[in-house]
Image: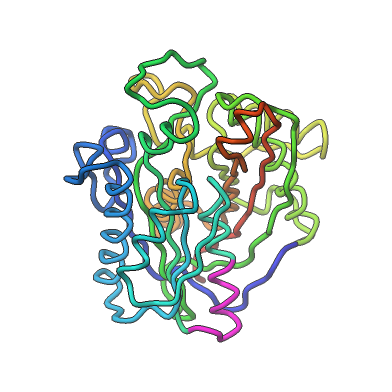
Amino acid sequence: MTIYFKNVFINETSTITGPYEKNGPLSQYFDKSYNDLYFNQETWEQAEEKIINESIDMLKEKSKIKDIDILLGGDLLNQIVASNYAASKIKSPFIGIYSACSTSTLGLILASTLVDNNIVKNAVTFTSSHNNGAEKQYRYPVEYGGPKPKTTTFTSTGAACALLSKLKKGIKLESGTIGRVVDSKTTNIFHMGAVMAKAAASTINRHLKDTNRTIDYYDLVLTGDLGIYGKEILKDYLKLKYDIILKNYNDTGTMLYDLKKQPVYAGASGPVCAPLVTYGYIFDEMKKCKLNKVLLVATGALMNPTMTNQKLTIPAIAHAVSLEVIK
């Protein structure tokens, strides 16, 4: 299902990262980065909560807004607990959302719907993830030091926010496609690219059909976060299944880190991966008019520890947003 938006703009964004992202190739595009993963807190979960609040405060300061009409956000921790704690410190209505690593684009679609229909004047959507917190929950605590296969993706650490309103400033959010859950019958928690690639393909195909566009309509198709192996699976699957050939294409999971120098396996993952790359580097390119139309397709693996311990398959979903330079 694709929703068109008449008059919605991403006016401002904020991004905060951890040390791995700071040492990556896009560090200059982030608003703030920390040198350690605790962010001066006692636990990783508290660290994640802190940077959510800090990113929202930063967004309010950059945009000069005093009141947030509605807040939407989510994270990877069970019951999106980091987001809930963070929202408790902000006196705004809150919609907690969970779509795994596709939370950012789902948040943008929901926020745009509220703004475009005059339900609210502004909306702030955010997402976050923390490498050590996510690894402890979904795989094994990092202290174990267990080896991982090369298909593993590395959960990114950070928080990213976006302010949406009808004020004609920033980047236009032209439309959004809500994805369908796709089960590729994959059980491997160390190969998220294989888990999510078909969901990305399904949403891209659906978006193009709904909008009656070809893939060449976009200067860039950007997925997140398939990594180096999932990226190739997507390209092959789109061609074989839907006869769609990706040319101007990249994956945020392969962009956030230096894959040759940093020990991040197949690249980045996590809900904050796609918005860190998009709100930073991609928006900078769009503001310079080097890119005019971008289709951002964030992907999410809909798993939890109980089901993966039972060796069940991992469903996935992808949501897409069409981003345009203001004319």
> Farthest bottom residue?
118
Specify how the rendered protein is coloured.
Answer: rainbow
Residue 42's x, y, as percent? 21, 43
Q: Image quadrant for the N terminus?
A: bottom right
Residue 7's x, y, as percent? 56, 78
Decide whether the magenta segment is chiefly helix, strand or loop.
Answer: helix
Q: How many marks?
A: 0
Residue 22's x, y, as percent? 26, 38
139 to 165, vertically: above or below: above
Most foreground residue, 170 or 290: 170
Q: Is residue 290 magenta?
A: no
Residue at the (48%, 36%) spot, across then down: 269
Residue at the (60%, 46%) spot, across then down: 221
Residues shaded magenta: 110-120
Most foreground residue, 127 or 252: 127
> Farthest left residue?
40
Relative side of 34 to 97, left or right: left
Residue at the (40%, 58%) spot, across then down: 83
Most foreground residue, 107 or 175: 107
44 to 103, vertically: above or below: above
303 to 309, vertically: above or below: below
